[in-house]
Image (cartoon, rainbow, N blue to C red):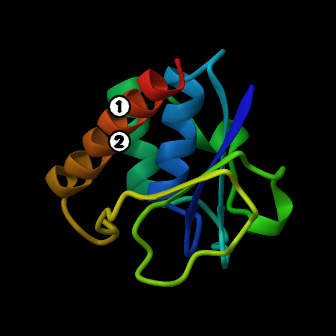
Amino acid sequence: MKKVAFICVHNSCRSQIAEALGKHLGKGIFESYSAGTETKPKINQDAVRLMKDIYNIDMEKEQYSKLYTNIPKPDILISMGCNVSCPVLDNKFYDNWQLEDPTGKDDEEFKKIIFKIEENIKKLIEDLK
């Protein structure tokens, strides 16, 4: 099974959402990981709340902010749109989803990003089938 890594700067919001939705929607199709070039003490609490409300996924149950050096070598690397150079992890496929960071914005802006990540995950699943 392919390993997919979602990379962002702090690994606290978009990449965590992608990891959670990857585990939820892509179960049995790919292994989902997230990581950052830096870390935060905890996952963005608006992301945690909205993912619980929308999908009944508790991201804090199994996820935490981690560095890209602390995850298995991915087959597919996806950048969330960090506006920085994401690390080269010798992966076979790379994509940049160019997603705005919703941190500090209202729930509607968060939901737009969450639903765009869901759409992208579903497309990735179709591509991997």
* Badge 1 amino acid: Asp
Relative horizontal placement of residue 72, taking residue 65 as reference (left or right): right
Q: Quadrant of the N terminus?
A: top right
Q: Dot 1 surroundings within 10 Å: few (below 14), some, or many (20 or more)?
A: few
Query: How many callouts does the rendering have?
Result: 2
Toward which corner of the image does residue 127 lie, by quadrant? top left
As drawn, 116 above or below 126: below
**Horizontal relation, residue 16 to residue 127: left or right:** right
Residue 42 to residue 123: above or below = below
**Horizontal and vertical percent position of residue 34:** 64, 53
x, y (%) of residue 83? 41, 82
Q: Indicate the secondary structure of the residue bearing disc 1.
A: helix
The crowding category of the residue bearing disc 2, from other C-alpha atoms within 10 Å (few below 14, some 14 to 19, many at least 20), is some
Label for residue 50? 2
Q: Which residue is mark 1?
A: 53
Task: Say which quarter of the image contains residue 98.
Answer: bottom left
Q: Is residue 62 above or below residue 78?
A: above
Please tell me which residue is depicted at 68% across the width and 37% down the height of the picture. 61
Of the residues shown, which amino acid type is indicated by label 2?
Answer: Leu
Q: Residue at x 67, y 74 (%)?
A: 39
Task: Tell me which corner region of the image, top left, top right, bottom left or bottom right, holds residue 62.
Answer: top right
- Discs 1, 2 touching: Cβ within 8 Å: yes
Give whichever of 129, 82 is nearer the camera: 129
Q: Which residue does the image show at 29% across and 67% down from the upper left?
A: 100
Q: CA distance from mark 1 to mark 2?
A: 5 Å
